[in-house]
Amino acid sequence: MAITKGAKKALRQSARKQAMNRTRKDAMREATKAVRTAPKGDKAALAAAYKAIDKALKRGILKKNTAARRKAKVAKALAK
């Protein structure tokens, strides 16, 4: 358990960031799942997935190459 005042504050900040990261990651997962179940050529589902992946990249949840790979995978899944 945190003892100093600064350590307690860092613990609170870390918990808030973890909750936001989890929310963003879950949204990204849901969007990519929606693309897989969407009919072929559904541009709205693809746009939502791209947006979720880009936001995760912007927030530092994903690395640049990982985001690019996921976007390519999602586009390929929609084409099938």
Image: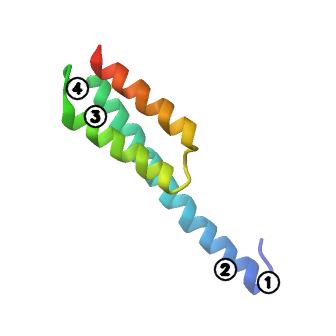
Real-space CA distance between mark 4 and mark 2, rounded to the nearest whole angstrom:
44 Å
Real-space CA distance between mark 4 and mark 3, rounded to the nearest whole angstrom:
9 Å
- Inspect the image, locate mark 4, and give the three-letter code of the amino acid beneath it: Ala
Q: Which disc is residue 4 wearing? A: 1
At 51% from the left and 60% from the top, the residue drawn is 19
Residue at the far top in the pictured view: 80
Q: Of the two numbered discs 4 and 1 on the same chain, state the one appearing first in sequence.
A: 1
Mark 3 residue element: helix
**Quarter the N terminus occupies:** bottom right
Q: Of the two numbered discs 4 and 3 on the same chain, state the one appearing first in sequence.
A: 4
- Check if mark 4's residue and mark 3's residue have beta carbons within 8 Å: yes
Real-space CA distance between mark 1 and mark 2, rounded to the nearest whole angstrom:
9 Å
Q: Which disc is residue 46 wearing? A: 3
| Residue annotated with mark 2 | 9
Real-space CA distance between mark 3 and mark 2, rounded to the nearest whole angstrom:
39 Å
Q: Of the two numbered discs 4 and 2 on the same chain, state the one appearing first in sequence.
A: 2
Q: Position of residue 14 (x, y in %)?
A: 63, 66
Q: Which disc is residue 38 wearing? A: 4
Q: Nearer the viewer, mark 1 or mark 3?
A: 3
Mark 1 residue element: loop
Q: Of the two numbered discs 3 and 2 on the same chain, state the one appearing first in sequence.
A: 2
Q: Nearer the viewer, mark 3 or mark 2?
A: 3
